[in-house]
Amino acid sequence: MNRFVTRWLRPLIVCSLLGAAALAQAQTVFRVTAIPDEAPTELARKAQPLIKYLEGVLGMKVEFTPVTDYAACVEALVNKKVDLAWFGGFTFVQAYVRSGGKVLPIVQREEDEKFKSVFITGDPSITSLADLKGKDVSFGSQSSTSGHLMPRSYLRQAGLDPDKDFKRVAYSGAHDATIAAVASGKVQAGALNASVWDKFVAEKKVDTDKVRVFFTTPPYYDYNWSVHADMPAAVREKLTRALLALDRATPEGKEILELQRATRFVPTKVENYQGIEAAAKSAGLL
């Protein structure tokens, strides 16, 4: 009887051990992704020091996993293909809704508590939002908070319907691409992330004698780092503490925070994004 039981149980035990080993192996890689709101090379450059830092904190290999578009970033975290995702406010809301509330924001930059978008132009005749009537205007990605949703929301508050009042609405796909479209004259105006605009100005990648800001939106909550609720609590807490601990007073913290265009990271919560959810529903985008 014992030989019979052993003969049948041995394969099950072996399979169980192999399954456990495979699971352990799968958990030795921690995957990070981000919405592609800038060029892929820039996203990879920004990620590298953070990846190195997280490897030391988590004690495992950390990989940056690029995605093709905003929707792919949402699906990657919702389906647990990645462990940590950098979302804009709108993509966070999409992921939160899509997951049935199982995607959770853990930290945001201090700057994201009062984020802004800018409208830029190279056309001297454009000095206000009202002047955009009949013009070609570019947003970033359709799922971008700062490059589409919130600019569209403030346009509507100003009495403008982009789909009716503009000659043409274009979607560049990314903030830097919007700057390029305006600078080249492909469109008369564009809306984008104020942080990216400031970076381009500081790095002298845009001629401000030819392209200028003519409207800046009121502040709103925007980007955050999010995880799936199924992440073990201990890992989530360690990750959160590590991000909150980054300090510009240290060489490592300074490098990471500067690349992330952050003063520091602060705790965040789902409730911070209710305004963005309301704006998305009002615009028929959610």
Image (cartoon, helix red, strand yellow):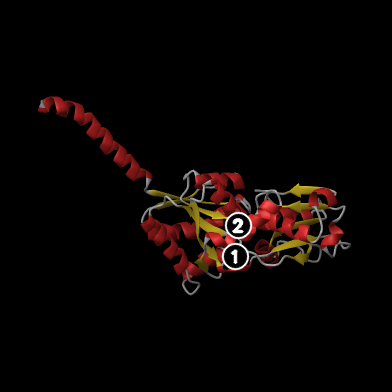
Q: Specify the quadrant of the image occupied by residue 234.
A: bottom left
Q: Specify the quadrant of the image occupied by residue 114.
A: bottom right
Give the percent coordinates (x, y) of residue 172. 72, 49
Instruction: Report, in whole angstroms, how far the alpha carbon at label 2 lies from the one at label 1.
Output: 9 Å
Give the percent coordinates (x, y) of residue 286. 65, 48
Please give the name of the residue rendered at 67% of the width and 53% of the height, measured from the top-left corner: 280
Give the percent coordinates (x, y) of residue 248. 50, 72
Query: In what element is the residue under mark 2?
Result: helix
Q: Specify the quadrant of the image occupied by residue 200.
A: bottom right
Q: Is residue 202 left or right of residue 229?
A: right
The reply to whether the C-beta atoms of the residues labelled 2 and 1 are less than 8 Å apart is: yes
Please give the name of the residue rendered at 14% of the width and 24% of the height, measured from the top-left corner: 4
The amino acid beneath tag 2 is Gly
- Give the labeled residue for mark 2: 89
The residue nearer to you, when weighing 169 against 46, is 169
Query: In what element is the residue under mark 1?
Result: helix
How would you rate the neighbour count of disc 1 (Cα within 10 Å): few for under 14, some for 14-19, many for 20 or more? many
Give the percent coordinates (x, y) of residue 132. 84, 57
Q: Is residue 175 visible?
A: no
The residue nearer to you, when weighing 252 against 20, is 20
The residue nearer to you, when weighing 274 against 216, is 274
Please give the name of the residue rendered at 87% of the width and 52% of the height, measured from the top-left corner: 134
Task: Specify the label residue 112 is tagged with.
Answer: 1
> On screen, 194 above or below 42?
below
Task: Specify the label residue 195 is tagged with.
Answer: none
How would you rate the neighbour count of disc 2 (Cα within 10 Å): few for under 14, some for 14-19, many for 20 or more? many
Number of labelled discs? 2
